[in-house]
Image: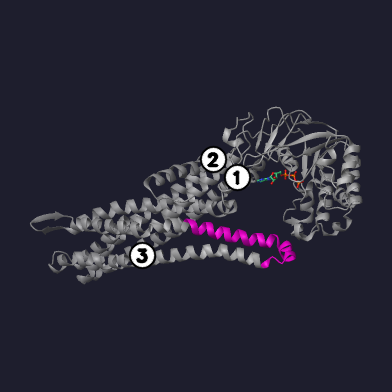
Amino acid sequence: MQPQASPQSYRFALRHFYGLAKPYLVSEEKKKGWGLLLLVLAMNLALVWVNVKLTQWNGEFFNALQAKNFGAFKQLLLFFTAYAFLYIALAVYSQYFLQMLQISWRRWMTEVFLKDWLAGGTHYRMSLRQGNTDNPDQRIADDIGGFINGSLNLFFGFVSSLVTLFSFLFMLWTLSGAVTLMGVTIPGYMVWVAILYAGVGSVLAHWVGKPLIRLNFFQQRYEADFRFGLARTREHDEGIALYNGEQRELAGHRDRFANVWSNWWGIMKRQKLFTWYSAFYGQLAIIFPILVAAPRYFAGQIQLGGLTQTAQAFGQVQGALSWFIGAYTSIADWRATVERLQTFVDAMQQAQIPPREPVPPTPAALQPGGDIGAAGVVPLRSARESVALGDLLLLAPDGRPLLQCAGEHISRGQHTLFTGPSGSGKSTLVRWLAGIWPYALNAAHAHAPSGRTLFLPQKPYLPLGTLKQALTYPQNPGDFSAAQISDALQLARVPYLEAALEQTDTWMQRLSPGEQQRLAVARALLIAPDWLFMDEATSALDAPTERAMYALLRQRLPDTTLVSVAHRAGVIDFHVQIYAVEVDATGQGPARMHRREADLARKAALGEGGIGDAPAFAS
Ligand SMILES: Nc1ncnc2c1ncn2[C@@H]1O[C@H](COP(=O)(O)OP(=O)(O)OP(=O)(O)O)[C@@H](O)[C@H]1O
């Protein structure tokens, strides 16, 4: 997405802002939110009032100095003390309450985003639809805060500037008097000069600063890509070290940093131009009003206090009018942040659990390369205690047909094995049953089982934290007694890990793949689900240990139905029904499933090195 700073895009940004901000302002925290918002607003208005008073004070003070009036001088000093204290207190507390509002709002919004992102595999389905949302971590960690801070700062800046403008316009009009130019008398001429000065300044600032919008947008994206690349290297350090892949990694990081670097140069050059301009404009603003008002002072029409007060009022009017100049880059950043968050929200909505009724796919979806979007995505959850696949057709994200089902059915207790060549769609079927694979057609008569399910993938996920937390994931360690945990580790043949239960480590890096898979078996023993889906969940174990793990699961979890995806013959005996997936000979159509007898499957496995090899099943 490339930001276009047209008036229409600002209208969109405002509409999206409304959609993003409204939920908090009508949420259960609305009282606190509105209360803080109004409090900070009142304090900002009070600050403008104090500014007006200080400007008036300034005129009176310099007049008292010029008149050498010591009594007035002393009294004005007292007034100054009162105004200054009020100003300081307001400045401190308006900032404090503003920050309180920012963090409360951010906490609320982050919670909502995290929940939506992590709900029902949404995060996974979003990652399937590449291109829509880059770096979700950045959206949640940075953009929510940026959105809230930017919106609040712009709002209060806008209101303060508006009120300042009207308060000081009136004062400036009164002070400035009239000027006659080429026979035409212009009343309140300082006001017109201030408007002209700020107007020209704003137009020039817009012209000079415009490219910064695009540059800042891309800078954030490039920074996030670079950070993400580094995080991946850290995560996969062992693989990289074993492959001696450091040079490739280095090249990748250099490439990503080159984007950061070259875009940054663009920002620097444009920022330099902008700073030339804004510094010149700011310096000129100091002397400009005095120059314009000086003729009246030297003509004796105003006193020294009048001159300084006029200069201050001019500065305030000009400053308020030029608010757009100061806020220019902030508005651009804010707009980019709003758009990024909105894109993220849209992507989350598209990836959320689809409607229960299947949506007919578009013809394009069935063409290779066609994008079926979220249509037809229906992992229907059933109240029935079985798996039924009907004539479900699983698709790849690009619409390519992967696997055609033909009425396969698994009842409770009917331990089932799916086997077949690599890439034929077995894992995709498991993902669909888990409700996270959205690309499927003809799902009306297919359903996943009800009840408690646990899916063990080939690479078990072990979260950051203690080993006990990793073992009991996704449940909490407190859900199990020490004896249950100890038993599970003993049975899964990793008794020595008991000593490390309270240790914190990156367990996915520290434990061997086989240990991780045995830990996952221990997890299944603890959780004791109704349905256990094992997608090559024992592939890293030696054959005897693999058999021992299956025997253990069958023995210890008598009420659990096993649904496995596996390649080795050793697991056949633990299943009562076997489906072999056969790929289409032409390579064009989807793979298909065939029911196999255990003997035939075993023979195929022994003969061809894999139980799913197509030639062994060819009739
Ligand atoms: N996220 C994805 N994006 C695009 N294609 C995918 C994605 N996930 C899977 N595929 C493709 O879908 C096809 C089926 O993959 P799947 O993992 O289901 O195969 P499998 O039969 O389980 O293979 P294996 O036995 O090697 O695990 C493959 O061609 C794979 O490349």
Q: Is residue 225 magenta?
A: yes
Label 3 belongs to which residue? 81
Residue found 53% across the figure and 51% down from its top: 144
Foreground tag (3 vs 2):
2
Image quadrant in which you'd find residue 192: bottom left
Image quadrant in which you'd find residue 456: top right
Question: How packed is label 2: few (under 14 Cα within 10 Å), some, or many (20 or more)?
Answer: few
Q: Is residue 475 or residue 603 the one in the foreground?
A: 603
Label 2 belongs to which residue? 27
Disc 3 under 8 Å from ligand 1? The reply is no
Q: Secondary structure at mark 1?
A: loop
In the image, residue 212 lies at what x, y percent? Answer: 42, 59
Q: Quadrant of ligand 1?
A: top right
User: How far is mark 3 from mark 2, CA to CA?
Assistant: 42 Å
Inspect this view and state whether residue 523 appears.
Answer: yes
Image quadrant in which you'd find residue 124: top right
Residue found 61% across the figure and 63% down from its top: 252
Q: Amino acid at mark 1?
A: Arg
Q: Is residue 223 magenta?
A: yes
Foreground tag (3 vs 1):
1
Q: Amino acid at mark 3?
A: Thr
Label ID, residue 129: 1
In the image, residue 606 lies at what x, y percent? Answer: 90, 46
